[in-house]
Image: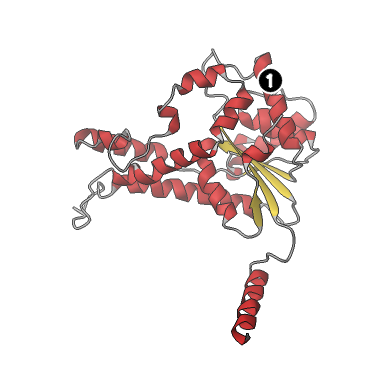
Amino acid sequence: MKNSLVFALVLAVAASVFGQDAQPKIKVYLLGTFHFAQTDSTYDVLSERHQRSIAKLCESIQRQRPDKVFVERMPEFEYQNRVDSLYQVYRAGQFKPRRNEIYQVGFRVAKALGHPTIYQCDSPGMYGTYYQQCLEYAEKNGQMDILNAKAKGTTQVLEDRINDDSLFRKLDLLDYLKWLNSEPLHRASHAHYINVYPQVGYTDVFDTKGDDDYFLGSELTADWYRRNIKIYAKIIAQLDYSEQAIFLVIGNDHVPIIRHLFESNPWFEVVPTGDWLRY
């Protein structure tokens, strides 16, 4: 009995230390998306059809009443990108939103909820540089089956297993976003970062060779984690913990890591996208 009481006391102290009994958890709403502006002329998010779908999407977000809306831009460069400055012009009705999801979703939701500012949280990464190095190494050293996720121990992203382009063009935009944010797709896209790239490069663990090819692909994965941890850090740096809910719209591949970070933080509760992305 004595040990049980001690154990219960330890658990109570631990919960207090973690802040779990201090206040309700901040709800986190994450929306992974494709980049609206990076589509060809046959898929225009400004068309009447897609605008109706985006309006429904924004209504779903607005019903969650997030206190802050975060978008994929670097806050350090506000003096260059001027995202919040553009948002102030947008609030005044003097800025016609462009195709980018920052404007189509972030601006629209924040304005509808009466938010005085838009929050930025992106951080730079070196994916393009590392991928090019991996590609060149794989081509020269017979590792293209690994890089193309056809070797044992690798996972293909779901978009490569189906006709994703056909799905993209046939589905309503909101339905396509539901597909993008589905758990199977997120699992496969994240697995690609942790079981494909770390196998690329010179992988003899006993011989570093003294050059940059030693576990080359793992540098890409490490950089991807670093970038997403920085994004997460920039989000929580802009909170005062009086918020009841926050919303982030960001490129879909970012979501698995960012979700894990928030799920691991006892001050937050990640709401599954499928629970609120409805119309």
**Residue that carries the numbered disc 1 in the rendered image:** 51
Left or right: 168, with 25 as reference point: left
Instruction: Give the quadrant of the N terminus.
Output: bottom right
Is residue 184 shown above or below 38?
below
Q: Is residue 123 visible?
A: no
Residue closest to the far top:
42
Is residue 201 shown above or below 237?
above
The image shows residue 158 at horizontal and vertical percentages of: 44, 32
The image shows residue 169 at horizontal and vertical percentages of: 54, 17
Work out whether residue 62 or residue 99 is closer to the camera in this orientation and state it.
62
Residue at 78% from the left image edge and 40% from the top image edge: 115
Query: Quadrant of residue 152 in the image?
Result: top left
Instruction: Give the quadrant of the C terminus.
Output: top right
Residue closest to the far bottom:
2
Residue at 39% from the left image edge and 40% from the top image edge: 192
| Circle 1: element type | helix
Query: Quadrant of residue 249 in the image?
Result: top right
* Total numbered labels placed on residues in the image: 1
Q: Is residue 207 visible?
A: yes
